[in-house]
Amino acid sequence: MNPHRFIYIDAPGIASLYGQLHGEDLVETLLTMEHSRSSGWKMALNAFLGGSGESGKATKEARASRIVLRPENMLHEIVASLRAHGTLHLSIRDAIARTASTREPAWFEARHPFSVPPKLHEYNKMRAIIFVSGFQPYMETSPATPRISMSASLHHFPSAHDGQLSASGHDALFFASLNGQPHPYSVFGSIFPCGDGFQIKPYGIHL
């Protein structure tokens, strides 16, 4: 498994999707494992008498581990379920074709270039970051690059504090280094028509 660094993860939204998937709110589970161990003195006696040192009798032990599901784990199961049911698109272009046809939100998990205009002060004031694609001057508008916007609440950024990004924090420095240039982010979410373009509701964004 290749761990991802999520810059945005909507934990309440993911929990809601996970609850719909399983029909219940699953917070934690207990994993029970059993293994056998042979009695030490019986093994020693058997070895002294010329045996193999292994006892034919064993004692069963049970150990329980408490597992708490994190949003990242739930997200993995949600994506796998959508893929198994054939309702997950692996490119934004395919998801756009679907939602443009049905006029209903389409699920996708894909990497796509988005620009983050360098407006950290405004984002902290709004407590949200706006990702855009197909908007000048950040990207040339064309039929192949329709206008897409994606609003991501700073309350769902792991690096944010009280809905604010520190100017010296990793994410703020990363956005500043791009200076508005497009970067391919991996996004899981749903996309739907909005005006003359499309809007994305993100659930997870990672680099």
Image (tube, rainbow, N blue to C red):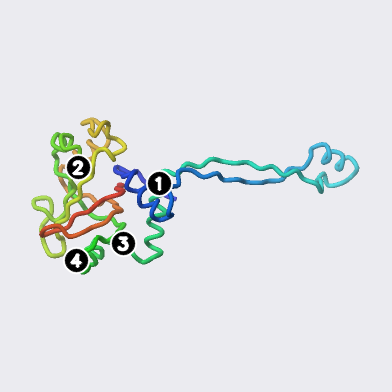
**Extreme residue toward the bottom, this view:** 101
Residue ID for mark 4: 100
| Amino acid at dot 4 | Ala
Tag 2 or tag 1, which sits nearer the N-term? 1
Residue at mark 4 to residue at mark 1: CA–CA distance: 33 Å
Q: Residue at x 88, y 40 (%)?
A: 48
**Extreme residue toward the right, this view:** 49
Q: Which mark is residue 3?
A: 1
Q: Residue at x 13, y 38 (%)?
A: 119
At mark 3, the secondary structure is loop
Residue ID for mark 2: 129
User: In the depicted view, which residue is nearer to us: 20 or 41?
Assistant: 20
Tag 1 or tag 3, which sits nearer the N-term? 1
Q: Residue at x 15, y 45 (%)?
A: 180
Q: Which mark is residue 90?
A: 3
Q: Nearer the viewer, mark 4 or mark 1?
A: 4
Q: Residue at x 20, y 65 (%)?
A: 103
| Amino acid at dot 1 | Pro
**Extreme residue toward the left, this view:** 137
Q: Position of residue 150 (x, y in %)?
A: 20, 50
- Specify few, some or many for label 3: CA neighbours under 10 Å numbering under 14, 14-19, or 20 or more: some
| Amino acid at dot 3 | Leu
In this picture, is 134 found above or below 30?
below
